[in-house]
Every structure is written in C-alpha cells, then in structure tokens.
Image (cartoon, rainbow, N blue to C red):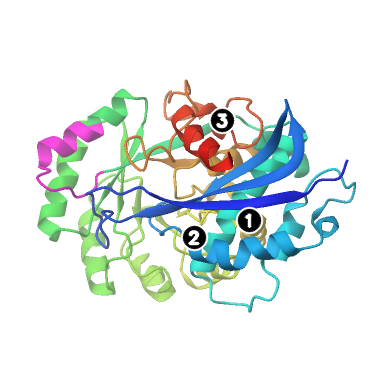
C-alpha cells in the first residue's frame, strides 16, 4: 500500500475571550485548524489527520495556505513515505515543509509548521491503527504510561473579577479533581497581586498547590521584587518572569528565588531550548520546561529538543508543556514528560480531554483512541469533521 497526501485544508477560527494576562488580551485571539487528507480508506472513509495551534499565538492561515501546504502537495509522494512505503514518515514530511527555509527566525513559521506536523502525526498513528502515545513509546522503546499529570490554568484578569470570583474559580478546579492550579500575575500592581495570591492560597489550603505566571512581563528589577514577595509562599512554580529570550534575566533571578521556576513556552526551536539551558540558569533539580510542540515546529522538532535536554542532563520528566492540548498529552504519555497544562474553562473546544475522561487526584488516563484521539471529543470533532468534508 502506498500513501498519498491528497489535500491540506486550513480554516482560521476564533477562540476569543475577554480575559487578559500581564501582556495581552484575548478578545481577538484565533487558531488555525488544519486537516491533512490522505488516500488511505478506513471504514469507507479517507483517513484524515487534524491539527491546530495553541492559544496565545494567532492563526497561521496565510503561511499555511501560501507557503507550507503547497510545498507538501508539490512534493513527490514517494519522498514522504517511510522505508516500508506503507505510511507517511513525519520527519520526511517535515523536511519537505522546511525546504528552502533559512535557519533561524523561529517565529510565526514555527507555529504554521507545528500545526501541520500535528495533523501529520495524527494521520500516521491512525494509519498504523494505534493511539499516538503508544506509537511514540514503541518508536522510542519505552513503556507507555497512559496516566498523565495535568494542572488547571486560569486565574486570568477579567473585567469585574474580584477576589471572591477568583477564589470560586480555583475552588471549581479542585472540585473537578485538580491538585495544582495556576493564576496570572503582573497585570496589576505588586501589592494587589500579593492580595490575589493570598486569597487563592487561603481558598486551596493544603488541598492543592499554586503556580503563578507573569507571561514575560517583568524587567529584572520588577522580576526580583516579585521574587522577594513570592518566595514567602509555597508555590509550585514562578513562571516566565521576563522576556523569553532574556536568558541573563532568568539566570540572575535564580539568585533571588530559590523555589521552582518555569519557562519555555515562547521558545520555538531546539536551538533556543539549548541556549536556555546553557545560559538561563535553569536548575534541573527543581525547574520546569514548557516547550509547546504546536508552537515550535511540531513533534519532529520536539524530539530534537528532548535530545538536547538529555545531552544537557535534563530528563524529559522536567517538561510540562504549555497549551493544554491532546497532542502534548500523547507526548507526555508516550515519552515520559512530567505532565501537561490544562484549561478547564477556556479556549474551547480545542483544549481539554476526550468525552468521559475526568481528572482524578491531578491525573487523567489516556483512552485507547487511534491517533491523537480528537474523535473522542465531540465538540472539537464536529469542527474538524466539517473542515474535512
């Protein structure tokens, strides 16, 4: 059997919300939804792989439609196949996408390629008839662990949202089985943020732990001022204090903040990941890395990033990706990551888990669905199916 990609379709969809973090609001946020249609037929229908990009970066319709999809459709189909010729080879597909691209410049194109890459891996696992996490574990000669740690991300700034509403939001996450919750900081003065943090800590008590996220807002002086305030609290982590590429700031901050820190969601290549570990002062005994494959050229590149981590003495278990999507859940279960972000109430239908999958003691259990498992989430699959048809 020979496999061909017969079409690559994209539609830009709104995931808007009146929420804001320390840097941006989400009133005009979009995502790209992609369908990679193959000529493989299962149950009377062509196998279609699906992908989308994570929140916080806008839809990439222009790049996908004008540059990357044509490159894939113009490639010799035989050059996209694995050695046996019975399935697509994601790395060869990735190479076709990136042909004639200069090195560096890991910006919007990394999101466009990552979105298509997600759809390709979904198709590959479906053609193989396996959940992606099991396919990945087999390829890396690992045992798949379908039980994955997840935390609840929220605590955004919202018009009229007072401390009572913030506490109620966090309580709702605990009621749904989470034992780590995250809130935004840096979008209000330090004193107000400290009051917000203390309100949440009073609400969750010993039932859960709190992470805080500044979304890259602070200069070094402000990051240190916050560090001196935050180190008095038993936080799960202090996330992305300064600009993602200011590795010196990140390194200096470690002198003032002994607790765990997290960053990496806005680094989009294995080269940037390597520079963070070389120069960012990150500590493998306590800190966390948040690279998001959907924003950083996809799983093919993410595997190169994991190789960089290993070479620098970091285990994959220190990675808890940004984005809250099922692609990273599969990577976590298949390659032994530390867990995944989750947005219980935001950016739907793209976030979350397949229908019927609940959180128990901060973990979910992956269902055995072919591919990434999008078909198990009815509201999301309705949008995907409409694009494919």
Foreground mark, 3 or 2? 2
Q: Within 10 Å of the Cα at label 2, are there few (<14), some (14-19), or many (20+) other Cα atoms? A: some
Q: Is residue 384 above or below residue 223?
A: above
Query: 337 or 296, which is in the foreground?
Result: 296
The numbered mark, 1 or 3, whose residue comes first in the sequence reads 1
Say left or right for 206 vs 163: right
Secondary element under disc 1, as helix, strand or loop, is helix
Q: Is residue 320 above or below residue 171?
A: below
Secondary element under disc 3, as helix, strand or loop, is helix
Badge 3 is on which residue? Answer: 375
The x, y position of residue 257, in whole percent, is 32, 60
> Looking at the rendering, in which quadrant would you find the C terminus?
top right
Q: Which residues are magenta?
A: 155-170
- Gap in Å between the C-alphas at discs 3 and 2? 23 Å
Is residue 53 visible from the viewing direction of this image?
no
Foreground mark, 2 or 1? 2
Badge 1 is on which residue? Answer: 306
- Gap in Å between the C-alphas at discs 2 and 1? 28 Å
> Looking at the rendering, in which quadrant would you find the N terminus?
top right
Secondary element under disc 2, as helix, strand or loop, is helix
The x, y position of residue 52, in whole percent, is 51, 49
- Is residue 164 a member of the stretch shown in magenta? yes
Query: How many discs mark residues in the rendered view?
Result: 3
The numbered mark, 2 or 1, whose residue comes first in the sequence reads 2
Query: 339 or 358, which is in the foreground?
Result: 358
Badge 2 is on which residue? Answer: 61
């Amino acid at each position: 059997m020979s496999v061909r990609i017969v079409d690559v379709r994209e539609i830009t969809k709104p995931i808007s919300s009146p929420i804001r973090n320390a840097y941006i609001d989400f009133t005009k946020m979009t995502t790209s939804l992609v369908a990679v249609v193959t000529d493989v037929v299962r149950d009377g229908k062509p196998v279609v792989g699906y992908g989308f990009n994570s929140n916080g970066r806008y839809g990439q319709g222009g790049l996908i439609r004008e540059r990357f999809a044509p490159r894939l459709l113009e490639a010799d189909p035989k050059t996209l196949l694995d050695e046996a010729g019975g399935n697509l080879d994601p790395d060869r597909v990735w190479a076709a996408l990136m042909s004639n691209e200069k090195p560096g410049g890991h910006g919007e194109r990394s999101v466009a390629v990552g979105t298509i890459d997600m759809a390709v891996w979904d198709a590959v696992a479906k053609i193989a008839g396996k959940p992606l996490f099991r396919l990945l574990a087999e390829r890396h000669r690992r045992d798949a662990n379908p039980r994955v740690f997840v935390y609840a991300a929220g605590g955004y700034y919202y018009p009229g949202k007072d401390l009572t509403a913030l506490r109620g939001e966090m309580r709702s996450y605990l009621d749904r089985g989470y034992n780590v919750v995250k809130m935004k900081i840096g979008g209000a003065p330090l004193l107000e943020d400290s009051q917000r943090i203390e309100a949440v800590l009073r609400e969750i008590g010993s039932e859960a732990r709190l992470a805080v996220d500044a979304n890259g807002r602070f200069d070094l002086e402000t990051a240190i001022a916050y560090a001196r305030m935050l180190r008095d609290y038993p936080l799960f982590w202090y996330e992305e204090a300064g600009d993602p590429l200011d590795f010196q700031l990140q390194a200096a901050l470690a002198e003032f903040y002994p607790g765990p820190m997290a960053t990496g969601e806005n680094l989009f290549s294995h080269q940037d990941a390597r520079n963070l570990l070389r120069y960012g002062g990150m500590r493998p005994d306590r800190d966390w890395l948040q690279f998001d494959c959907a924003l950083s050229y996809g799983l093919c590149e993410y595997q190169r990033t994991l190789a960089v981590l290993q070479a620098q003495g970091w285990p994959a278990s220190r990675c808890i990706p940004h984005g809250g999507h099922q692609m990273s859940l599969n990577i976590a279960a298949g390659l032994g990551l530390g867990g995944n972000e989750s947005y219980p109430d935001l950016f739907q239908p793209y976030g979350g888990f397949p229908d019927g999958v609940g959180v128990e003691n901060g973990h979910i259990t992956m269902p055995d669905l072919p591919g990434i498992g999008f078909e198990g989430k009815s509201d999301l699959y309705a949008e995907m199916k409409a694009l494919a048809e």
